[in-house]
Image (cartoon, grey):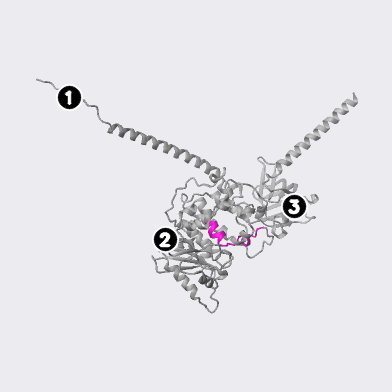
Amino acid sequence: MRNLSFRRAELNHVLKGTQVLRESNKLAEMEEPPLLPGENIKDMAKDVTYICPFTGAVRGTLTVTNYRLYFKSMERDPPFVLDASLGVISRVEKIGGASSRGENSYGLETVCKDIRNLRFAHKPEGRTRRSIFENLMKYAFPVSNNLPLFAFEYKEVFPENGWKLYDSLSEHRRQGIPNESWRITKINERYELCDTYPALLVVPANIPDEELKRVASFRSRGRIPVLSWIHPESQATITRCSQPMVGVSGKRSKEDEKYLQAIMDSNAQSHKILIFDARPSVNAVANKLILAGALRIADKVESGKTSVVVHCSDGWDRTAQLTSLAMLMLDGYYRTIRGFEVLVEKEWLSFGHRFQLRLGHGDKNHADADRSPVFLQFIDCVWQMTRQFPTAFEFNEYFLITILDHLYSCLFGTFLCNSEQQRGKENLPKRTVSLWSYINSQLEDFTNPLYGSYSNHVLYPVASMRHLELWVGYYVRWNPRMKPQEPIHNRYKELLAKRAELQKKVEELQREISNRSTSSSERASSPAQCVTPVQTVV
């Protein structure tokens, strides 16, 4: 009997141990992040405390993959989750030493490009800090460690191929190019004229390719004035370029002056041309008030019927901000989802905004002077316009936030490299996924339910400080007190479904009215029955 009791006790102990093991394994699985195709776990530390600036300290499991930093705590209901792509991390710093005293005084702090500071406390005796730090430094900064960015590992397939979204010839044709005043040249097909410009350029029709080379020698980095947009009626244009290299002696170029004259002559409605200088030393207003500068350009083109040449120092920062915002005001196509994607591809990516340098993808040198939030400023200005014209844009706020999140994430290949030439050399369309593939495969998430097509309307936003707002939905979204009770994009979906339902009812009623009017008109037009009058003969 004693042996039997002992065996039962031993069996119960084993069963309990198995149950505890299963529960711990189940808990571990629940604490692990959902992995993307190509993503794998590199390190994991349990019993880590996240020092949340809003809700206080919370204990959980910290995981580092080759794509993200993931923290999950099962102590709260619902579980607390922090999910940050490694690409958004600007720097990682150690806090305290092994002899540090005080609660949560020993750990790591990660400073992010989206203005988050993530602070984690480790137990000194656990020795997890060193391992997590080393893996973060390795996978958050792959370029500094001769490793590929995660975009080259990510292989998810979407119904749409976003790399095929933008075709420069199609966009030129949409604008009516070529015409008698403007032609498409292939002089830069091998990027020999200018290695930061696209392969195809639109230039004045009466300027031969040989003269283009001489104009390029007078412009910084060879970035000659080329067409960005043409007014469909007045033929007034927006052209972009870099600064002329006049030097201290005020050097001039006959070829450059002839070229600018050709741009002016292509617009028969005006005998003037506005040269918009956005260099900070020359025009500080353009640097401080981007929206006001773009508004002035749009007004000159639309109301003044005057062509505008926009340039800054190199023509890939403030110039891109100004031309793309002005085009957004002037052309309703760019206010659609796909049109805005084309605008980004055209004015920012193909014309050589230096995304790699400005964002520092995978580079641990966080103090690099080349880093600058130029594209973020542009998107902020777009958001300001959507606030002032809530029915003029097909896309919603979530669309803009998604673009900014993946500006840093390195999940997609869209914002990698510094130029069209570099993206071609890296063969990004074959080796990476486009952000537009992801967005255009689920358009309902990014559609503005209030959108009404204003394709022929020019938008004139108010650029005074009184009418500009802090973008709470982006800059303050990490504060749970500032979050709406339900995600806004879910509400967008509901409104879109309701709008579709109401549109269907309207169409049904219109058909019913049409059928009734048709049947009424048929009855009215049918021949009346022949009735013989009764006559009384007296």
Check disc 2 and report its element: helix, strand or loop.
helix
Q: Secondary structure at mark 1?
A: loop
Q: Residue furthest bottom?
A: 249
Left-right relation of 215 to 114 = left
Q: Residue 67, percent across and down?
A: 68, 51
Q: Is 446 one of the magenta-colored residues?
A: no
Q: Residue 244 in the image: x percent, y percent? A: 53, 72
Q: Report the amino acid beneath label 3.
A: Ile
- Location of the C terminus by quadrant is top left
Q: Which residue is mark 1?
A: 533
Label 3, label 1: how many angstroms apart (C-alpha)?
Answer: 107 Å
Looking at the rendered image, the disc whose residue lies closer to the viewer, 3 or 2, is 2
Observer-side mark, 2 or 1, equals: 1
- For the record, the magenta segment spans 343-361
The residue labelled by disc 2 is 302
Nearer the observer, 419 or 532: 532
Residue 132: mark? 3
Q: Given this view, does label 3 or label 1 mark the residue nearer the observer?
A: 1
Q: Residue at x 54, y 50 (%)?
A: 397
